[in-house]
Image (spheres, rainbow, N blue to C red):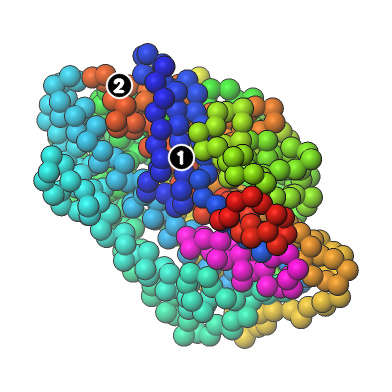
Amino acid sequence: MVKVTVDPLTRIEGHMKVSAEVDSSGLITSAQSGGMLFRGFERMLQGKDPRDASMHVARICGVCPISHSMTATNALDDLYGVAESVPQNALAVRNFIQAANTIASHATHIYILFGPDLANPRYRDVLTGSTLSLGATGQAVWNELLGRFAPLSYKLDGKAIPVGTSYLNAIPEKKRLQEAIALFGGKMPHQAVTVAGGVTCTPGLGEITKSAAIYLKVMEFVQNYTLGVPLDTWILNTAQAKSPDAAVKFVTDHLASLISKSSGNDFSRENGWKDVEFFAAFGSELVGEKILGLPASLRLDKLGGYQDPSKISFLSYGSFYDSTKDGYNPESPTGERFLTSGVVSGNLKFEDLDTTKITESIQCAFYEDDTPSRHPYDGTTVPVSKAEQINLEAGPTEKYSWLKAPRYNGIPAEVGPLARMIVAQDPLVTGLAKAFADNGMSPANVYTRVLARMQETAILAHKIVDFLNDIDPAKKFAEPLDLRAAKEGRGMGIWEAPRGALGHWISTDKSGKTKNYQAIVPSTWNLGPRDENGIPSPVEQALVGNAISGVDNVGGADYTNPVAILHVGRSYDPCVACAIHTIDATGKNAPRDYEL
Ligand code: NFE
């Protein structure tokens, strides 16, 4: 057995450690995911005016600050009992800034964080080496991978590689989207307009027109780089297809027609192979292997799957209010939001969301409590009291992470774009997931996670125009609050951040100050440690069974370049800054024998 540790896992947000035990055939047999960052938010809010929460929590993370302030705002809407009367206009503004942030965040992941994984020298060795005899096709695929995804600092054999065109050109689009958010939010990151009862901005035609102009520029990028068919056509035939089979057929037919005019090896953008098409073709059984003729060892759908469907589910709290009318239900019942809430089992069975089934376990996390697991309304965040209890090398039955372990009905849940698309039954993604499941494979894997993120980006790029249209400067944007409603009260905010289900739970004391605040964030769901029943988190399960150096360890396992850990870890788009909230243990609230 060899132990391979990646610490820190780079091109993610925050400080994450992944260790894997690898057997003599180069397969991962067990994995541990640890959040190694210690910071404080939840207890920071105790004793404060609840209305401060939405401003404070935005600072949890600079990547998804909209989602944190939005989720806190949802919790405050619930706490003050005003969710049902939030004006339609405010819901549309909230939807718009969230959609823009999610598109920008997904673009960051696809192009800046995950994309460069495909320029790993491992692919060069396999595609252009002699072992698999890929010849000109292998060389052409490798050239495209580098030409699109090589990051600025990429060096190969001491030689600087030109920056990938997709990588480089995605950056200004991110900036543009941030500008659109700032038009409504005052600034970005950490917009300052979502408050209980509505929003504080009153955008006029000027802001709406400027946002529309920014949108058109972003769409130029989409058509030039990412998608080979008009966005409307793509959505009509995938997200709005009559059935999952029809959506998958549209994509495979489209790729087959590209292949037939590629005379073997022309995978260029000019020939119609935009990034979505290129990624969809590369590394999948459905396309890469069956149509393009690439070897099975290159398949990304073989990496990052779950082996036991009874130990995993897919969870979404539902996102984007119906902004054509006033008010929303803070419980997010099935079908109310544009991307619906729900829970889908590892065997792809849907059930309605029931938030009373959510718990967080501290069994393997550096916290103490008299019970290992609690619902977030009763959650505690008390770091262990002795420095020696923080053993960063601890094994899987001990405490080994600053992340807690969220569970739904006792089962770990994957959250994020793939879970959202499966729960919302997007025809293309559910069609692919079902095809994998029907072939005895996991519906979730590196391939479906990244493709779902691309598909959700297309869906939101299409939908965001409706949110903009729903804003009517002539109507009101907020409802007044009755502050008395917050005494000895409680509120729940459930929402979807780019990386998945985000929940905030607040309760107040009899003076109306915040008594308890708990945030369970997407990366905690995906990347937490084991729970009191020893069940590993989604990423810990998804690493098991993979060839450590990816591509089936062709040419032998390479422990110095553990592609499987990099690909699988990054496929969740981790953000450890979001995932850990505890306190600066100065001794004020709970004496500790260590200082931070
Ligand atoms: Ni820091 Fe976040 C998102 C949230 S991740 S990026 O998306 O909430 O866990």
Q: Is mark 1 on a helix, strand or loop?
A: strand
Q: Can residue 487 be seen in this view?
A: yes
Q: Residues within 10 Å of mark 2 (few under 14, many from 20)?
A: many
Residue at label 1? 17
Q: Residues within 10 Å of mark 1 (few under 14, many from 20)?
A: some
Instruction: Give the mark, 2 or 1, whose residue is nearer the N terminus.
Output: 1
Q: Nearer the viewer, residue 77 or 214?
A: 77
Q: Residue at x 41, y 33 (%)?
A: 5
Q: Which of 516 and 491 is in front in this view?
A: 516
Residue at label 2? 557
* Residue extent of the magenta highlight: 45-71
Q: Is residue 405 left or right of residue 178?
A: right
Amino acid on which the number 1 mark rests in the picture: Lys
Mark 1 CB near ligand 1 (8 Å cut): no
Residue 246 magenta: no
Alpha carbons under labels 2 and 1: distance apart: 21 Å
